[in-house]
Amino acid sequence: MIDYLYSRAPFNNMNKHFLDLNNFSKDDIDRILSNSLEIKSKGKSLKILEGKFLSLVFEKSSTRTRVSFEVGMAQLGGRASFLSVNDLQMGRGEPIEDTSKVLSSMVDGIVLRTLEHKTQIKFAENSSVPIINGLSDRSHPCQLLADLLTFREEKGSIEGKKVTWCGDFNNVCFSYAQAAELLNFELIIACPKEFYPEDMKNYKNVSFTQSISKAVEASDLVSTDVWVSMGDEREADERQKLFSDYQVNQEILDQAKSDVVFLHCLPAMRGQEISHNLLEDPRSYVWKQAENRLHAQKGLLIELLN
Ligand code: CP
Ligand code: NVA
């Protein structure tokens, strides 16, 4: 009897999961981004993942992450299925461990969007195939791949550059902080003192200020995100007040380098974290950034599933 037809080897190498940006080395990230650019230049013709199947398990809403993974798999010759957690038995209380064991016995990779990061870890510990974090309360590493790809296409290497984050120290910002350490750029975070993380001293190449003007001065890349992330809705009123001085607008971008790149992971709240027309400013690359979710994740899928 051919054993491998009936069972998969346990997948014990946690490094093969992509729960956070620092599951990869700088060389890994460079390779993924180079592959992404090459795949992007070749269009839809590379059927490298023929026969591969990706499951998307989401506990929260999504436009970009869901569609970019579904389309990415199709363009690479594979398939994907989307499962809202309410459609799964997990939504009725089946343990995460059991769900992970069963799903990973059938599919080649799983993308998770979870309320809590610990769900991602539990899934990974019980999965025989790679788990990809498609956003948790802690981090959004796939977003960073797209942001890094966009900066690389427009300006080249990010090493040694000055990057500014304005607003909430949230999941996307946390992944920026990991990127700053891994890829050796300077990250300045402008936010109210109440939102400085307790372990702020642990972040390498990262500094904090309450002054948005100081933070954007001579910056190569300015990025921001909503003030109220999914899961923070109960604090919405308080957050609107506390972040009201941290809006990125034309005047703020004027204080950065003249060729600054402005990014926003989207969805955006115009009139809150950005001024009404900022996405259409010539310094904004957000539409390219959003499309790059597709190209960057194709590079990631080839790295993990091929
Ligand atoms: N930026 C991002 O992850 O968008 P979605 O929530 O639409 O997936
Ligand atoms: N910080 C946002 C990102 C959405 C892509 C959120 O978690 O809602």
Image (cartoon, grey):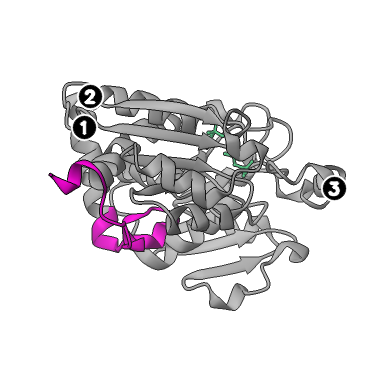
Magenta-drawn segment: 1-29
Q: Give the answer, above or below, for where 122 lies relative to 265.
A: below
Report whether 110 appears left or right of 251: left
Ranked by sequence position, the earlier of labels 2 and 1 is 1
Total marks drawn? 3
Name the residue type under label 3: Lys
Q: Nearer the viewer, mark 2 or mark 3?
A: 2
Q: Residue 77 has which mark?
A: 2
Q: Among all residues in the image, which is located at the extreme front?
A: 1
Q: Distance between the Cα atoms at labels 2 and 1? A: 5 Å
Q: Residue at label 1?
A: 49
Q: Residues within 10 Å of mark 1 (few under 14, many from 20)?
A: many
Q: Is residue 215 left or right of residue 290?
A: right
Please tell me whether residue 221 is drawn above or below residue 71 in the rendered image: below
- Quadrant in the rendering for residue 274: top right
Numbered tag placed on residue 241 in the rendering: 3
Marks 1 and 3: which is nearer the front?
A: 1
Q: Residue at x 18, y 36 (%)?
A: 38
Q: Can residue 59 be spotted in the picture?
A: no
Q: Is residue 20 magenta?
A: yes
Can residue 180 be found in the magenta stretch? no
**Residue at left offset 22%, top offset 28%:** 51
Q: Is residue 132 visible?
A: yes
Q: Are there few (<14), some (14-19), or many (20+) residues within 10 Å of tag 3?
A: few
Comparing 211 with 36, the one in front is 36
**Which amino acid does the dot numbered 1 rest on?**
Leu
Which residue extends farthest left? 1
Q: Quadrant of the N terminus?
A: top left
Question: Which residue is at a point 22% across and 21% down the rendered structure image?
Answer: 44
Q: Secondary structure at mark 3?
A: helix
